[in-house]
Image: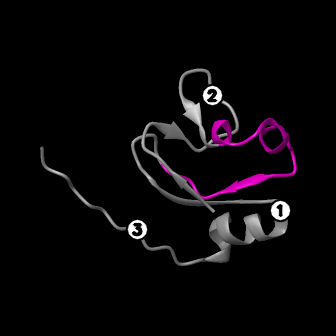
């Protein structure tokens, strides 16, 4: 599990922004067997999973699996 901070993209690499994998040691960051499970926008923070189980990843992320997901929005006023 990883709590993705705002300003970070859910990706292995990105030319413009810090990525989820940038928070991990090189031995994990460069491991092609690790999959990011979940997709959060750049300015969104929240829980994503990182796994080496590609089948589990597909079972959660594939729209045909119909896995129910709940999102909570907290609006902050400045």
Residue at 66% x, 72% y is 64
Mark 3 surroundings within 10 Å by alpha-carbon count, few (fewer than 14), some (14 through 19), many (20 or more): few
Q: Residue most toward the front?
A: 25
The number of callouts visible is 3
Under circle 3, the secondary element is loop
Quadrant placement of the C terminus: top left
Residue at 44% x, 36% y is 7
Quadrant of res 58: bottom right
Q: Circle 1 sits on which residue? A: 54
Q: Circle 2 sits on which residue? A: 14
The x and y percentages for residue 63 are 62, 67
The numbered mark, 1 or 2, whose residue comes first in the sequence reads 2
User: Which stretch did the figure color magenta?
Assistant: 21-40
**What is the C-alpha distance between the residues marked 2 and 3?**
25 Å
Residue at 63% x, 41% y is 23
Q: Is residue 52 above or below residue 30?
A: below
């Amino acid at each position: 599990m990883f709590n993705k901070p705002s300003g970070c993209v859910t990706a292995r690499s990105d030319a413009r922004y810090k990525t989820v994998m940038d928070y991990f040691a090189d031995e994990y960051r460069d491991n092609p067997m690790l999959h990011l499970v979940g997709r959060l926008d750049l300015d969104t923070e929240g829980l994503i999973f990182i796994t080496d189980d590609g089948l589990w990843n597909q079972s959660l992320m594939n729209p045909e699996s119909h896995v129910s997901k709940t999102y909570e929005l907290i609006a902050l006023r400045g």
